[in-house]
Amino acid sequence: MDDPRKLVRGLKDISSLFNTVSEEVPVRRSPEVQVLGVSSPDCDGDSLLLNTFFASQIASSGKACSLLSVLSRYAKVSSGPGKGMPESFGNHLERYCLYWDELRDLISEPFPPRAEGILQSRDIFLDFEYRHLLHFEKAVSLLDKWVLLLKPTAESLTEGYKMMKVGLALNPQLEFYITLSGKAEEAQGAMAFDQFSDFVSRHLDAHLGWLGWMDLADPARHFSAALYTEPLKYQHWNAKPSLQKFMLAGWIDSLERKAKASALVEVS
């Protein structure tokens, strides 16, 4: 057997290697990026209006929130795609525009090995008209949460069910949240949601979240405040990160930096 004293000396010689305290490297958390959408089979043409309203409910100074309108080539907008300049839509909310083919090309590109700057956390509301989804159905795969504004009628609920069926076929992890159009005191509407939720659970194996009511009957388009939008905020326990979402957020980040740089040049 080897001399145990030699073994002790050998351990003493290398002990300093184990006693060295290494610097703790801070762990960088992934940016909190989520993509939401708001649609209605009854007022598809008001997609921008609906997305703007819901985005304004969760936008804050603590986290960037953006509207991204996906447009057909014949659409006319005041600040069109390709100009790279965001359009202010109120406090802490800016709108960007892309054509459908530009969105397809953007998320189909290989992820760059090096991104410009640090990607910031961001909520993105993908504003699109449902009837134009055929231009690029894969856009639904970007969504984390899809809010559907439905009337408490058989026709509207049926169309909403069809939209959910399409959405789940394209994105099985998609979450749905329901807002009913009408006055909050209508008891039959609450009953309609409960029955509809049970039907969807049995046939699509999907759970629906309830956000409340929006009264669109007001000529001034003043929406009711009877909404619970807390579930639309980012939730760590339910995050679904993907490269495509990060690329979308990175594209917005890039345009945001360019807009700020351009503003500084104009001021100077």
Image: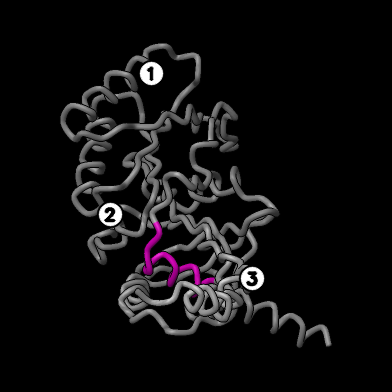
Secondary structure of the residue carrying tag 1 is: helix
User: Label 3 crowding class (10 Å Cα cut-off): few <14, some 14-19, many 20+?
Assistant: few
Q: Say which residue appears at 27% left-offset and 30% top-offset.
A: 157
User: Label 1 crowding class (10 Å Cα cut-off): few <14, some 14-19, many 20+?
Assistant: some
Q: Which amino acid does label 1 sit on?
A: Gly
Q: In which quarter of the image is residue 218?
A: top right
Q: Where's residue 232, x and y in %?
A: 49, 42
List the single residue furthest toward the top.
187
Q: Can residue 255 be seen in this view?
A: no
Q: Where's residue 85, x and y in %?
A: 59, 76
Secondary structure mostly seen in magenta is: helix
List the single residue furthest toward the left.
203
Query: 24 or 101: nearer the eye?
Result: 24
Secondary structure of the residue carrying tag 2 is: helix
Q: Which amino acid does label 2 sit on?
A: Arg
Identify the residue under disc 1.
189
Q: Say which residue appears at 38% left-offset and 54% top-offset.
A: 240
Q: Which of marks 2 and 3 is in front?
A: 3
1 or 3: tag closer to the N-terminus: 3
Q: Nearer the viewer, mark 2 or mark 1?
A: 1
Q: Could you say which disc has been placed on residue 131 in the image?
A: 2
Quadrant of the rendering where the N terminus is positioned: bottom left
Measured along the vertical axis of the image, is residue 234 above or below residue 134? above
Q: Say which residue appears at 69% left-offset and 84% top-offset.
A: 262
2 or 3: tag closer to the N-terminus: 3
Q: Which amino acid does label 3 sit on?
A: Val
Span highlighted in magenta in the image: 241-252
Q: Are marks 1 and 3 in contact (CB under 8 Å)?
A: no
Identify the residue under disc 3.
21
